[in-house]
């Protein structure tokens, strides 16, 4: 695997955090989850940030947090909305290792429903038009940024991680 940061992208529920954590353990790298870093630095939850300061404030923080960590030899799990920031997209375009964890909207809905810790402010109504249109708008951007795409639909977290560790 490369000596640079490996960045996981994909929609909410794709498994970026779980895969990132396992990949980091198995490669002995530092794991950085952008949402978690933001919550620690802001000392409040993502939902509270969305509610009190708004989505665009969160997007700025997310891009800054990405930028700060790109130069490390680590695994970075982004939030699904990282591609909503043009600055973040420009940064990601320059990276060699951007891995897209891809699956369909129904699988994502099922996984979010099964996540008892789901506190995502943009996933409160999984059947809404807004949720679907965010997925449709982001998907081509993830595709365009990816140096590698893994279809995660039928795979468990350990299987996805093993696949990532195999040569393409
Ligand atoms: C978001 C995804 C979340 C989190 C925030 C916004 C999005 O991360 O950053 O709730 O816009 O898709 P996950 O993709 O890890 O759920």
Image (cartoon, rainbow, N blue to C red):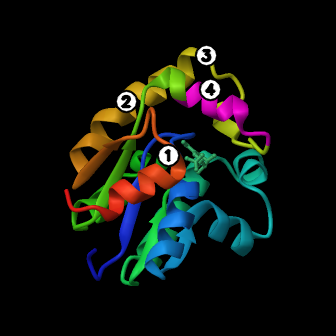
Name the secondary structure under disc 2.
Answer: helix
Query: Ligand 1: does it lie within 8 Å of the C-beta at label 2?
Result: no
Q: Which of marks 3 and 1 is nearer the N terminus?
A: 1
The quadrant of the image that shows the N terminus is bottom left
Residue 150 position in % (x across, y down):
33, 45
Secondary structure beneath dot 4 equals helix
Q: Measure how far apart labels 4 and 3 are at the Cα level.
A: 14 Å
- The magenta-colored residue range is 108-116
| Residue 146 shows up from this direction | no
Q: Is residue 47 left or right of residue 81?
A: right
The CA distance from mark 2 to mark 4 is 20 Å
| Residue that appears at 42% across and 32% down | 103
Residue 56 position within the rendered picture, expressed as x and y whole percent measured from the top left: 56, 50
Q: Nearer the viewer, mark 4 or mark 1?
A: 4
Q: Where is residue 67 in the image (x, y as percent from the top left)?
A: 41, 73
15 displayed left or right of 164: right
Label 1 CB less than 8 angstroms from ligand 1: yes
Location of residue 152 with respect to 146 vertically, above or below: above
Q: Using the image, determine if residue 79 lies above or below residue 105.
A: below
Q: Nearer the viewer's eye, disc 2 or disc 1?
A: 1
- Residue wearing tag 3: 128
Q: How crowded is mark 3: few (under 14 residues within 10 Å), some or many (20 or more)?
A: few
Name the element at disc 3: loop
* Mark 4 lies on residue: 110
Q: Mark 1 points at which residue?
A: 80
Callout 3–callout 1 Cβ contact below 8 Å: no
Within the magenta stretch, is there residue 15?
no
Query: 104 left or right of 44?
Result: left
User: Residue at point 62% right, 15% down?
Assistant: 127
Among the two numbered marks 2 and 4 on one chain, the one whose residue lies closer to the N terminus: 4
Disc 2: which residue: 137
């Amino acid at each position: 695997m490369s000596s640079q940061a490996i960045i996981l992208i994909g929609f909410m529920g794709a498994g970026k955090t779980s895969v990132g954590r396992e990949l980091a353990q198995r490669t002995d790298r530092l794991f950085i989850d952008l949402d978690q870093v933001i919550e620690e630095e802001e000392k409040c939850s993502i939902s509270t940030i969305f509610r009190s300061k708004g989505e665009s404030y969160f997007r700025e923080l997310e891009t800054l947090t990405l930028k700060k960590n790109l130069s490390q030899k680590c695994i970075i799990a982004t939030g699904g909305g990282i591609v909503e920031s043009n600055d973040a997209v420009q940064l990601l375009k320059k990276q060699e290792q951007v891995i897209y964890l891809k699956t369909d909207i129904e699988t994502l809905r099922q996984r979010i429903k099964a996540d008892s810790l789901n506190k995502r402010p943009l996933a409160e109504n999984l059947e809404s038009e807004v949720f679907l249109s965010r997925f449709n708008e982001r998907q081509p951007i993830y595709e365009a940024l990816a140096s590698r795409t893994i279809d995660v639909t039928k795979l468990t977290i350990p299987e996805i991680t093993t696949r990532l560790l195999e040569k393409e």
